[in-house]
Image (tube, helix red, strand yellow):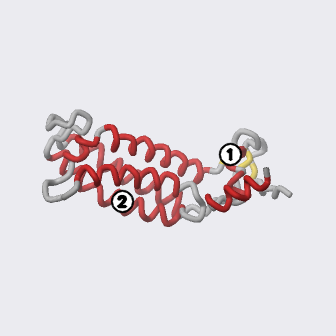
Amino acid sequence: MEQIRKYFESITALTDKDWLFFSSKLIRQEYRFALSARVGISAMLVLTATGHFMFTKGMAMMMPGFIPFKTELVYFTGFVEIAAAIGLLLPKFRVLTGWLLIIFFIFILPVNIYAAIHHVDMETATFNGDGLHYLWYRVPLQLFFIGWIYFSSIKAKDPEPVNIKNNQQHAYRKSV
């Protein structure tokens, strides 16, 4: 069992502390807020990535005409979102992944604005979308995601977890 754990540590860059994540909340009754936030945004990224594969034609319509290889870009960005979801959970890559995701979210915002202006409905691949009303929702949501990523992956120092049983910080115990 120890060899399996060491193998997964080597390929995933997880440390002893990180293995405790999987048991920390349920068994030890501890919360790690920044990690929980990263798990949440990772889940969101995996769900939105599936949209890249389910609604490829509609997402390709969201891009302006001068952009080549639209379908390929839709697939590529879907894979980027999956890779980012994984990267946010790997301690050695979380800060770099956070910065790259912020840049990614800034770059995709003009595509969302273009799609809203042209009433693109990505699910039906038609021009019957909500239009500019969509931006009242999308722009603040995009800013929220950027803040969420910044505070949970870049700025967060991952302090010791809070023990909810006696409401105090708790040091990790190293397994021998």
Horizontally, residue 56 falls left or right of residue 95, namely left
Helix, strand or loop for disc 1: helix
Check disc 1 and give the amino acid type.
Answer: Phe
At 33% across and 37% down in the image, what residue appears? 54
Dot label at residue 145 = none
At 86% across and 58% down in the image, what residue appears? 176
Res. 121 image quadrant: top left
Most distant residue in the right direction: 176
Residue 156 horizontal/vertical position (percent): 57, 61
Q: Are marks 2 and 1 in contact (CB under 8 Å)?
A: no
Check disc 2 and give the amino acid type.
Answer: Phe
Marks 2/1: CA–CA distance: 29 Å
Horizontally, residue 124 falls left or right of residue 93, namely left
Q: Earlier in the sequence, mark 2 or mark 1?
A: 1
Horizontally, residue 120 falls left or right of residue 41, namely left
Res. 133 image quadrant: top left
Q: Residues within 10 Å of mark 2 (few under 14, many from 20)?
A: some
Which residue lies under the disc numbered 2? 104
Helix, strand or loop for disc 2: helix
Foreground residue among 128 and 71 = 71
- Count of all numbered marks drawn on residues in the image: 2
Residue 35 horizontal/vertical position (percent): 59, 52
Foreground residue among 85 and 135 = 85
Position of residue 28 relative to residue 154, above or below, is above
Which residue lies under the disc numbered 1? 22
